[in-house]
Amino acid sequence: MSARPDPADRRAAPIAAVVVLAAGGGTRMKSARSKLLHEVAGHSMLSYAVDAATAVEPQHLVVVVGHQREQVQAHLTDIAPHVRTAVQAEQKGTGHAVQCGLAELGELAGEIVVTYGDVPMLTGETLKELVTTHREAGDAITVLTAHVANPTGYGRIIRDDDDTVARIVEERDAAEHERRVTEINSGIYVFDAEVLREGLGQLTANNDQGELYLTDVISVARRSGGRVGAFVIEDLWQTEGINDRLQLSRMNAEMNRRILERWMRAGVTIADPATTWIHADVDLAEDVTLLPGTTLQGATSVATGAVIGPETTLTDVEVGENATVTRTQGSLASIGAGAVVGPFAYLRPGTILEAKGKIGTFVETKNARIGPGAKVPHLTYAGDVVIGEGANIGAGTIFANYDGVTKAVTTVGRYSFVGSNSVLTAPVTIGDGAYVAAGSAVTGDVDPGQLAVARGRQRNINGWVARKRAGSKTAEAAAEASASSDAQTQQGDQS
Ligand code: UD1
Ligand code: MG
């Protein structure tokens, strides 16, 4: 083996490449979707692998794809355009997969990190520690290992007398005494690039599965005098791969538990962690309160003093200071400081509720800007609207924005008042300081200061019940009412 660079140089140099293995089938997911695209805390499994790999700032980052590779490649183009892919058309083992990855990159010097695409909890921090350990020891290979209670299915770490790693033996190839070893191979490693190249060149499929095992590179390295070390990780979740939906749900639960713990330590009150779900990118301030059944997704952010829940799901929603959001479903919306939402509100994309505004009970909003202090308190559909500061929208108002062909906008001016059970057929502009009488069907503009009454005038027809409903209880009640009012009138005459 040729001389390796001085350890001091190695410390300074960047990692040559990270190779993420992701060509395997994932058949146990029983899914039309690639296993790697299934999500943990709102992100694909693969995106965690790419994030961890990116954190070590390698010169090259290559993902080896195979099964359902069109989906995987399209997803990578979306989330991580800096990543290259290498195709492993047929899955002939982890050693072959790394060969495919390196073939994409050409000659490399330095170190190469190998990880898996389906190990979402592994962090960039851990990879950095692995690299640091590797560099400080000056080893040819460093393996990320863990001691587990049940090592079934994993490759076992066979240590030498001097405690270095002698080899890794797969369970199916292992002797009885080797199977009793509880230190397992995570499948994550740092290799000296030259050692890896040499080792991969010498692999044979001489094992139970007839595959080219990456793990066999260790024996090759040892034979040519290389030292192989191990970095033992305590946090077992970081080596946990996902193969089926049971493991996926357990991983999601653990990821969520960690996210909630982090937010509670950061000053967020979480009334019921068992029913609260927070995605990885959500941002919460101190003194936010989350009530039971709250789910916060996407790029949702909540400012200090706000109270969310119970039973609320917000996706990409910005919540201002001291706002309250109760039993609400919302997405791509913004809720201003001190605003009140719910219970039972549905905020669709483009909803902007300004400071101290209100979207109340059984209200649906879409593309709606509701000004400071304006109120839409009950039973309303507000689509494509601009509502001015301090305006009040009565119960049961419908903003009819769609004529079956096109959508149009309705504007309500500052401090205007729309009476209950009105329909405003867009496009319509209600000026500042105007009134709409309850029960109106408004189809034309209303100027500032005007009252619009757009409904039939009330007519009262005398004697109708006696004529048309003779003999009914209603007619009886009417007769009694008129008799007693006659009597009262007479008494009044006497006094
Ligand atoms: C492998 C290791 C084993 C280790 C375990 C940790 C080998 C020979 N064995 O076992 O020591 O304990 O991982 O989980 O390396 N892959 C490809 N192409 C292939 C084969 C696999 O891309 O041809 C990818 C898979 O998509 C997966 C990863 O490599 O992400 C591991 O493959 P898998 O078959 O799960 O590894 P094991 O055989 O379980
Ligand atoms: Mg396998």
Image (cartoon, rainbow, N blue to C red):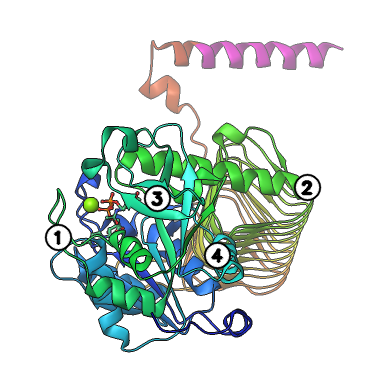
Three-letter residue code for mark 3: Asn
Q: Which of marks 4 and 2 is nearer the N terminus?
A: 4
Say whether disc 3 or disc 1 marks the residue closer to the N-terminus: 3
Is 281 rendered above or below residue 275? below
Q: In which quarter of the image is the N terminus?
A: bottom left
Q: Residue 124 carries which label?
A: 4
The residue tagged 2 is 267
Q: Quadrant of residue 177?
A: top left
Q: Distance between the residues labelled 4 and 3?
A: 18 Å
| Spatial CA span between label 3 and label 1 | 19 Å
Position of residue 322 relative to residue 71, above or below, is: above
Q: Does residue 350 show up?
A: yes
Viewer-side label of 3, 2: 3
Q: Do the residues labelled 4 and 1 touch (CB within 8 Å)?
A: no
Q: Can residue 268 be seen in this view?
A: no
Disc 2 and disc 1: Cα gap in Å? Answer: 55 Å
Mark 4 or mark 3, earlier in chain:
4
Q: What residue type is labelled 4?
A: Gly
Residue 226, percent across and down? 43, 69
**Mark-to-mark CA distance, 4 and 2:** 25 Å
Distance of label 4 from label 1 (alpha carbons):
32 Å
For the magenta stretch, what is the residue range?
A: 477-495
Rendered residue at 58%/59% (across/down): 453
> Is 448 left, or right, of 436 in this rendering?
right
For badge 2, the amino acid type reads Gly
The CB of the residue at mark 3 lies under 8 Å from ligand 1: yes
Labels 3, 1: front one: 1
Percent x, y for residue 352?
Answer: 61, 65
Residue shown at 48%/82% (left/top)? Answer: 4
At 47% across and 50% down in the image, what residue appears?
145
